[in-house]
Image: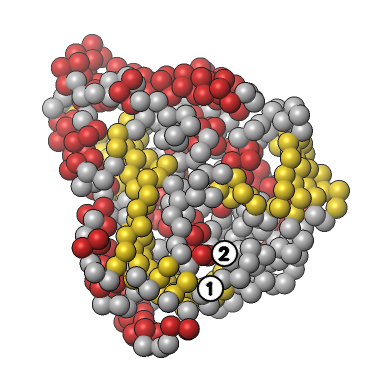
Amino acid sequence: MQWTTPRKLIAGLAIATALSTSVFALPVQAASLRMAWSQDATGLDPHKQTAFSSLRLLELIYEPLVRLDAELNVVPAIATSWEFASDAKTLTFKLDPNAKFTNGAQVTSADVKASFERILDEATSAAARSNFLSIASIDTPDAETVVFNLSTADVPILVAMATINAAILPASEITAGSVGTTALGSGPFKLDSWEPNAKEVLSANADWAGGDLAIDGITISVLPDETAILASLRAGQTDFALLNDPLVATMVPSEPNLELNRVGVLAYNVLQLNPSRAPMDNLLVRQAMSCAINRQEIIDAALAGEGKVTGPLTMPAFAQDPSTLFCYEQDVEKAKALMAEAGVDGFTAKVIAATGEPPVAASEAQVLQAQLAEIGINLEIEIMELNVYVDTWLKGDFDMAVAQNGGRPDPFPMYNRYFTKDGNLVKVSNFTDDELDSLMKQGQAETDPAKRVEIFHTFESRLAELSPWLWLSTGYSYTAQLKTVTGFESSPTGTLFGLTKVSIQ
């Protein structure tokens, strides 16, 4: 595989435009999808990446054991079937014998074992490591059978496995130390070339066990902003695009040749506080901030009304009415009283936000800045390039951060990484609490669905009251396409895996 060095954006755009024009003029049977997005991947290691832009690329190249469908059901991927033991302490998978990596090698139980051992190795710094700490050992009785022996009942581990952060990699690549420098997966597409911040070229994987694709490949152009993407769609130079900005997305339905795909997502917008730094180490100050903000006003001003107020749990099976949570209705007088009780007469802090992911981050920060000024808090906004923001975020090196974090259908894999003592992203939250830790472990081990809901309702209520973060809203995932493109299936996870069902008329 040839990796080309980054080029200046203008040069990359000129090439992408020239290629797009020539492809558009070809007969539709050419069936190569011309796609665009404004934020490129930041890396190619599926076990380490946290940026949505990276995961959306990698999920087209790699595969996990299982994945989630559009209704959030766990469905086969590399594994064709799975079974928990009656005590939920053993989980056995049968692998698809037709699953192959793009080098032609069969995906075997040895690859699965090596992949999860890599995830569990602290030296890897895997993004989802703490979701799999219940794995005590892994047996591989034959090439197509994998048995996970668990230290505790762990029903949510199956949902945790349905993510590209749990992708199965070739054991040979792990041994060679080449993961992240090559992209050798078993997914529907293979990555032929990558010009960072300019273009990716993917071709259909003829050996993909998931079935035949109706397109020959995807050429992804990285355009400077989403207004440029909309212009490219209007001109017929782009077939399909990912949109993150609701202001741009809401313009698509008025375009006669375009269609908008819009679905509510589990991801959430949040103001992350750093409770290890004064005065946010004071519970009363954090609670005052929660009381001072008007979440609906942030949605209306920064998201063009495209969202709804949320508590920590965004998944329908577990979410509570946010109005029942601590101070989710704005109460400025209560906020001022809490600040007075804390003995804090205002303070200055820096809030970081990333460019492009989400594109509304700067607007959210500005609304928060105005709202918190009412109780004497002066926010200094620092906008960072995404890769710089991610590095800073992972180190927890901020006073506050405007973030958009991914959601999961189950609360345990969604939050144990941040809010348990063994969480591998506890550096990001800078916060632990004995009761939250206990509730998380109870929710992990409980197998009765109704009891799990009760446990996580208690967890959510306490988390909102402790206010280490201030949850704001959930929004929508948007993609836009020419009306000649059909078959794309949106998902509440925001995945682009639905491109496997796309055809071009």
Q: Quadrant of the N terminus?
A: bottom right
Front residue of 138/481: it is 481
In the image, is 252 to the left or to the right of 188? left
In 3D space, how far apart are the residues under numbered discs 2 and 1 (Cα atoms)?
Answer: 16 Å
Quadrant position of residue 299: top left
* Residue under numbered circle 2: 61
Front residue of 187/404: it is 187
- At a point 54% along the width and 50% down the height, the residue shown is 69
* Residue under numbered circle 1: 214
Q: Percent x, y for residue 49?
A: 51, 53
**Disc with the residue nearer the chain's start (2 vs 1):** 2
In the image, is 373 to the left or to the right of 275? left
Report the residue that reaches farthest toward the top: 341
Q: Percent x, y for residue 386?
A: 36, 55
Q: Percent x, y for residue 171?
A: 73, 59
Q: Is residue 114 visible?
A: no
Front residue of 175/215: it is 215
Is 92 placed above or below 78 here?
A: above
How crowded is the residue under tag 1: few (<14 C-alpha within 10 Å), some, or many (20+)? some
Is 20 placed above or below 131 here?
A: below
How crowded is the residue under tag 2: few (<14 C-alpha within 10 Å), some, or many (20+)? many
Q: Percent x, y for residue 219?
A: 44, 75
Quadrant position of residue 255: bottom left
Instruction: Tell me which amino acid carries mark 2.
Output: Ile
- At a point 41% along the width and 88% down the height, the residue shown is 26
